[in-house]
Image (cartoon, helix red, strand yellow):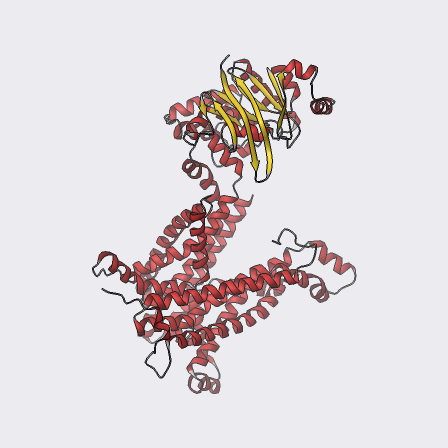
Amino acid sequence: MDFSQIVPALPDLWEGMKLTLELLVMAVVGGIALGTVLALLRLSSNPLLSGFAKGYVNIFRSVPLLLVIIWFYLAVPMLLNWITGDFVPVGAFASCLVAFMMFEAAYYCEIVRAGIQSISRGQVNAAYALGMTYGQAMRLVILPQAFRKMMPLLLQQSIILFQDTSLVYAVGLMDFLSSARSRGDILGLPHEFLLFAGAVYFMVSFFASQMVKRLQKRLAV
Amino acid sequence: MSEMISIQNVSKWYGEFQVLTDCTTSVAKGEVVVVCGPSGSGKSTLIKCVNALEPFQKGEIIVNGTSVGNPKTNLPKLRSQVGMVFQHFELFPHLTITENLAIAQIKVLGRGRDEAEAKGLALLERVGLKAHAHKHPGQLSGGQQQRVAIARALAMDPICMLFDEPTSALDPEMINEVLDVMTELAQEGMTMMCVTHEMGFARRVADRVIFMDRGHIVEDCHKDAFFGSPRSERAQQFLSKILQH
Amino acid sequence: MNYNWDWNIFFKSTGIGDEIYLDWFISGLGWTIALALAAWAIALVIGGLLGVMRTLPNKWLSGLATAYVELFRNVPLLVQLFIWYFVVPDYLPEQTQVWFKQELNPMVSAYISVTLCLGLFTAARVCEQVRTGIQALPKGQANAAMAVGFTLPQVYRHVLLPQAFRVVIPPLTSEFLNVFKNSSVASLIGLMELLAQAKQTAEFSANIFEAFTLATLIYFTLNMSIMKFMGWVEKRVRIPGLMVEGGK
């Protein structure tokens, strides 16, 4: 085992990590936004809207993320082609981002829904009694409280997502894992680079989960 | 006297179960009406129907000339004119006291932040809690929270106030501080509809008393008549139970 | 561009032998199920043991189990799979190495790697569910069992585990479903399970939407059937009068 070659390769690996983090941040933000919309639909009294959200969540939660990534990679360029009638190069990054956002939204939806339901009916009534509309009551009263309660779970899910971004290997995107593998192959040190990548993923996830645990304890008081 | 709240033949069902049966009464401008009755008698449901927090299936409720049940009514606007105080205070725990008082003034009435906060502070002083303005609701006692909740409702310049068991979640030693604020309000001429078990308050402050039982309005009369000689047997039993303590 | 919708594609010849595309899906589903069941068996045994270890008073044993969980939970599944498939075989004794890399059918060696990987990965998650289940039992149960003279192993065998086992059925069901979904990473080291077959069909026939729709439907149906089945199991083993709030 020869780990000495890793240091000179760090700038390259950092490029890969940047792509991983970019994908992560955008997928988390987009996923939570879409998940929140889905949660609101799910809780709507309109059976069509809540049925749609329920179906969405059920389908995405029952298929592998990898399937969604590959499907979108193959299908998104085609769909755009139909819509615009013209060939639009989307690239693996965009199709992966859409796949992650849509897939994670199903998981975030369930977290947000539980968070909203944990806020008492009285708070909604109080907001309405002050003359707030549904939108105002959600935005100013319910969601700020719900998000505070859900924060640890949302972060936990995002740590899982951080690990899952490595699946973009399937469509050839140069994320952290892929760039470590390609460096390792070029230098003839595949084992070392793979183990190093594993160690980095471990440290980031481990420390992030420790932070979440601490946050959880603080919120519990 | 002109009518502020008029409730006509209101009935309400939860599925098969009827919670309100043909309720009719009214509250005149400047009048203080106490609604009492055993638990499960529908009194809280009735008061929540007045600002449409609960829908009802039959009858009509008119608040200051506006029909509550009419689907065309702008409910947020109507509710912003009707103050409501809840059993469990329902201050917004993620906001400070000042923000609790200001938020609806700003977002619903469109007042400026400075104006809203100044108004909130003035009302806070009135209920004797100015020193707590920067705190969060969780840092106050139940009685203090309920006084803030009253101030929050008053900040909207309501044309009338609804109280839904404002003292029943409070420790006994805190009940009076809340009742004092309510009494003061009544003496200033505020129109009030109060669901409460505080018969002392009813006797001192109310003009009329409504007694409900199993979704019916059983008695609706001047307070002297109610306390002097309630006509129904149910009201007599209720009074003798509650007044013995 | 024109897309040729063709839902009959699954009954058409793949051009390889006399196979139709549906055969590919059936064989893929077979591998997926074989992977998931074997990995689940490993996960249950090791995860169950680790879960018990985490609740033991012995600091060393519970610390060891905790370390295992942290390690396997914080490294991406794909990295773990690459390690099992590319790194570990190089450190086997020479004879085994030759057997694993050369003599064995490549499908089978991939199968062994994925099963081991997925089993050990899932064991960490099973461990956490079992620990939570045991710790959720009232403290008085362990005390009462000790008071009648049980040894610690007996306390677990006769009192704690039979109760915890029932509590953890719903969370374990969702872990079981995860094993099926996670087994799709096997496609990335060349094992022709369901996802790999769907991808191959999409590439061979250019009927991307049909191929992936069928794969989605199969995963969805698998999910639903397992949930129904586990719901039935849960009902069968429920103790009358206990866990009322958990029951539907």
| Quadrant position of the N terminus of chain A in the picture | bottom left
Residue at left offset 45%, top offset 66%: C219
Residue C165 image offset from top left, x and y in percent: 64, 62
Residue C30 image offset from top left, x and y in percent: 47, 75
Residue C19 picture quarter? bottom left
Residue B86 in view in this figure:
no
Residue B65 left/right relative to B199:
left
Residue B90 in view in this figure:
yes
Residue C149 picture quarter? bottom right
Residue A100 left/right relative to B192:
left
| Residue C65 vs residue A42, the one in the foreground | A42
Residue at the right extreme, as displayed: C148
Residue B162 left/right relative to A202:
right
Residue A183 vs B60, above or below: the answer is below
Residue B189 image offset from top left, x and y in percent: 52, 14
Residue C62 vs A37, above or below: the answer is below
Residue B33 picture quarter? top right
